[in-house]
């Protein structure tokens, strides 16, 4: 049955203000980020700081941006959001930059919303569709799902595929697992209210279809390229599907059982070693195997 108790009739499509993707894109980060402000708070975890964070900070400072760095603690919790928010306030940060995986990016969206400043999302893996979305998933300190925050989409999403290609191919595969649920779930939500609070636009259906088509066409080639740390057309296509198409598709199309069940899985300690997309893919794979057998 459609989930529309308030009888919403307006169609709603939402997205980031700007999406940039390409090899060595972080070298041009200042050009894209400067319009957001002059004194950003940048947060990433210790591993990402060594991989990309330090170099990114240096390039932003060379462009005369006053960057405050704060290490992300690894889990997006209410206390962690509050801690980083205070650092931003103490340094009069006028926009927020998140560099890393989905939890880091969800955290900066929540900080920026609380401070009412712009936010930039710079993913270093293509493992989820979090970078483009207006949703932050908040967990308990033990890693259990706590609640959603429905915020605004990032002002800038900037992907450096040269950086993403250095990550283990498992992350890309998990992103495909997350993205493959996009069209499957959205098909069950066509008459239901999406996470933005409106009915799905026709464009969201087209995006879900294109996301699925891209994954089946280029998924294997992209995975093999990632194992070689090579940026190829197939790799670029799948990174876009995992991040942009899946992000726009789920948020404007809707989510269904796979993501709800996944949230319950977070309470099972034995499953904490699995990535978000690995759990989600397991929940939708029987549907996709039946529906898309001719495409394999």
Image: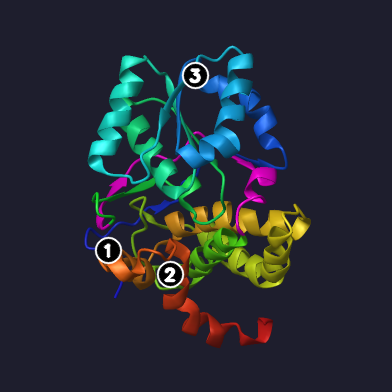
The verdict on residue 159 being magenta is yes
| Label located before the other in sequence (1 or 3) | 1
Q: Which residue is mark 1?
A: 4
Q: Nearer the viewer, residue 44 or 276?
A: 44
> Can residue 17 be seen from the camera position used here?
no
- Say whether marks 2 and 3 touch (CB < 8 Å): no
Report the disc number at residue 280: 2
- Say whether marks 1 and 3 touch (CB < 8 Å): no
The residue at the point 53 percent across, 80 percent down is 288
* Disc 1/disc 2 C-alpha distance (Å): 24 Å
Q: Which residue is mark 3?
A: 67
Numbered-mark total: 3
The residue at the point 24 percent across, 41 percent down is 78
> Can residue 117 be seen from the camera position used here?
yes
Relative to 203, residue 59 above or below:
above
The residue at the point 67 percent across, 51 percent down is 165
Q: Nearer the viewer, residue 35 or 227?
A: 227
């Amino acid at each position: 049955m459609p989930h529309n108790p308030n009888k919403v009739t307006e169609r709603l499509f939402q997205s980031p203000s700007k999406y940039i993707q390409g090899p060595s894109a972080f070298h041009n980060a200042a050009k894209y980020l400067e319009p957001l402000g002059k004194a950003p708070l940048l947060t990433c975890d210790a591993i990402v700081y060594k991989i990309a964070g330090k170099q990114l900070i240096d390039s932003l400072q060379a462009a005369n941006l006053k960057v405050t760095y704060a290490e992300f603690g690894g889990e997006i919790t209410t206390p962690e959001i509050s801690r980083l928010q205070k650092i931003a306030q103490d340094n009069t940060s006028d926009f927020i930059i998140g560099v890393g995986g989905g939890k880091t990016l969800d955290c900066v969206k929540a900080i920026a919303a609380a401070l009412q400043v712009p936010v930039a999302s710079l993913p270093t893996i293509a493992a989820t569709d979090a970078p483009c979305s207006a949703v932050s998933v908040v967990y308990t300190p033990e890693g259990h799902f706590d609640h959603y925050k429905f915020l605004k989409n990032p002002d800038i999403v900037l992907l450096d595929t040269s950086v993403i290609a250095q990550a283990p191919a498992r992350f890309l595969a998990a992103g495909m697992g997350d993205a493959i649920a996009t069209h499957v779930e959205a098909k069950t939500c066509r008459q239901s209210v999406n996470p933005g609070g409106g009915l799905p636009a026709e464009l969201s259906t087209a995006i879900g279809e294109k996301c699925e088509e891209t994954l089946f066409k280029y998924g294997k080639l992209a995975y093999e390229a990632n194992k070689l740390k090579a940026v190829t057309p197939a790799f670029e296509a799948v990174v876009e599907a995992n991040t942009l198409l899946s992000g726009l598709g789920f948020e404007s199309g809707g989510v269904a059982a796979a993501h709800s069940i996944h949230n319950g899985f977070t309470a099972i300690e034995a499953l904490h070693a699995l990535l978000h997309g690995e759990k989600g893919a397991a929940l939708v794979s029987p549907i996709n195997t039946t529906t898309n057998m001719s495409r394999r």
